[in-house]
Image: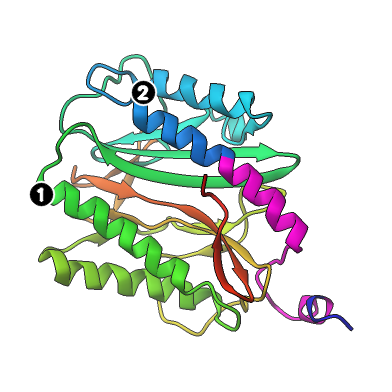
């Protein structure tokens, strides 16, 4: 029996073949291109809706379809979460970028039936030291999680690595960060959101095994204050409960015999 077939009989994070990983990487490259275009266009006076239009254009011109648009009724191609908004911010013409804003953009695309999902955080012009540290700490937590995507680890080894990365960043930057409660990463493939759910903290050594071909979307979300959130009346936008600023970084990542493979690179 082939190793892949043998592992499928055990409790593992769902696996993809080499060809399927390449297909997911093609979808991920579309997402990366859309995020680059958004980052380049983001400037004071730009509306979040115009960033959404840019993303949709890049995605469709690449022969892909926005994963988010219409997903459970979501009305846009990206989530644009600014300052105290954590995730799922709905783009609008009324929301205009200003100097010093901390912007998180989450974007997904489906190409030939396979999904890619990634998020970045950036500043509009110069950021305060606190906001810069927040974004970097979140990115470093993501990198720590990616490093744990190796054969033989378990799901919560990745969660624990993310948390460990956050705590290391707290020491490095000399400030505390809130790990947003109740939100995290997920399986991904033919659907955008699949089991298992991946927390951004927790004890190691639990949950399904990681095997060659296992894929997760890893997405830490940190704040400068609370771990608690509030969902606004639009039923989508998630904000920090105390008004503190938030950051969000994400990549879709595969486990391979040669180590982690990021599928959402350009």
Residue 74 tag number = none
Q: Is 160 placed above or below 22 here? A: below
> Is 92 covered by the magenta stretch?
no
| Spot occupied by residue 67 in the image (x, y as percentages of width and height) | 61, 36
Question: Percent x, y for residue 223?
Answer: 24, 53
Q: Quadrant of the N terminus?
A: bottom right
Residue at 24% from the left image edge and 16% from the top image edge: 45
At a point 60% along the width and 79% down the height, the residue shown is 151
Tell me the residue at 75%/39% (across/down): 112
* Number of callouts: 2
Residue 48, numbered circle: 2
Q: Nearer the viewer, mark 1 or mark 2?
A: 1
Magenta span covers which residues? 5-29
Q: Which residue is mark 1?
A: 129
Q: Is residue 134 left or right of residue 207?
A: left
Task: State which tag comes first along the sequence, 1 or 2.
Answer: 2
Which type of secondary structure does the marked residue at label 1 adopt?
Answer: helix
Q: In x, y percent, where is residue 29?
A: 57, 43
């Amino acid at each position: 029996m082939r190793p892949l077939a043998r592992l499928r009989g055990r409790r593992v994070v769902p696996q993809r073949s080499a060809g399927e990983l390449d297909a997911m990487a093609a979808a991920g490259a579309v997402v990366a291109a859309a995020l680059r275009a958004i980052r380049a266009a983001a400037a004071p006076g730009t509306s979040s809706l115009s960033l959404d239009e840019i993303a949709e254009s890049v995605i469709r011109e690449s022969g892909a379809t926005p994963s988010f648009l219409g997903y459970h009724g979501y009305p846009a191609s990206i989530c644009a979460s600014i300052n105290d908004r954590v995730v799922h911010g709905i783009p609008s013409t009324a929301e205009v970028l200003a100097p010093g804003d901390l912007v998180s953009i989450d974007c997904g695309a489906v190409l030939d039936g396979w999904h890619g999902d990634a998020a970045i955080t950036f500043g509009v012009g110069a950021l305060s030291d606190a906001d810069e540290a927040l974004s970097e700490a979140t990115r470093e937590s993501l990198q720590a999680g990616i490093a744990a995507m190796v054969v033989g680890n378990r799901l919560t080894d990745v969660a624990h690595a993310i948390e460990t990365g956050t705590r290391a960043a707290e020491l490095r930057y000399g400030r505390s960060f809130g790990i947003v409660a109740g939100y995290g990463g997920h399986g991904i493939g033919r659907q955008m959101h699949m089991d298992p759910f991946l927390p951004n903290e927790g004890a190691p050594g639990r949950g399904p095994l990681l095997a060659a071909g296992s894929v997760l979307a890893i997405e830490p979300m940190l704040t400068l204050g609370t771990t608690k959130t509030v969902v606004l009346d639009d039923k989508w936008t998630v904000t920090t409960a105390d008004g503190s600023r938030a950051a969000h970084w994400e990549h879709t990542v595969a486990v391979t015999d040669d180590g982690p493979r990021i599928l959402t690179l350009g």
